Amino acid sequence: MLPGGHIDLYYLGLRRKDARFDQGTALEERHSLGARVWGAYSEFDYNFEFVGQSGDFGGASPVTIRHRLRRPV
């Protein structure tokens, strides 16, 4: 991490007993683990966020990894 930077770590969990999707109605569980790194270095501001998600719906186990880069306004 660069000087003047910050980091947030987080976990988001979701459990729905009767989740309804096109595939039907079933138990849905999702687990998301993420990190956000932001700060300023010289004349540059930076802000990065990374999220990994896993879970299942009715026994199917999709895995999704997503990242988002945002420019400061």
Image (spheres, grey):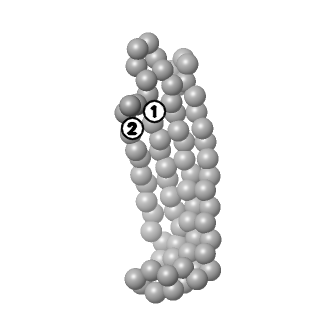
- Image location of residue 10, percent across then percent down: 61, 47
Query: Does residue 62 show up?
Result: yes
Could you tell me which residue is drawn at 60 percent across and 38 percent down? 8
SS assignment at label 2: loop
Q: Taking 31 as reference, is 21 above or below it?
A: below
Residue underneath mark 1: 47
**What residue is rendered at 57% in x and 51% in y?**
33
Observer-nearest residue: 68 or 63?
68
Residue furthest toward the front? 73
Q: Residue furthest bottom?
A: 24
* Percent of width and height locating residue 70: 39, 38
Label 2 vs label 1: CA separation? Answer: 6 Å
Q: In the image, what residue type sits under mark 1?
A: Asn
Residue 69: x percent and y percent?
A: 38, 39
Badges 2 and 1: C-beta atoms under 8 Å apart?
yes
From the viewer's side, name the closer residue of 54 and 21.
21
Residue under numbered circle 2: 70
Q: Quadrant of residue 44?
A: top left
47 and 73: which is toward the camera: 73
How packed mark 2 is, by other alpha carbons closer than 10 Å (few <14, some 14-19, many 20 or more), is few
Residue situated in front as seen by the camera: 47 or 33 = 47
Q: Residues within 10 Å of mark 1 (few under 14, many from 20)?
A: some
Q: Secondary structure at mark 1?
A: strand
User: Is the residue 60 above or below the residue 34 in the image?
Assistant: below
| Mark earlier in primary sequence (2, 1) | 1
User: Residue 7 occupies which quadrant of the picture?
Assistant: top right
Query: Which label belongs to residue 63?
Result: none
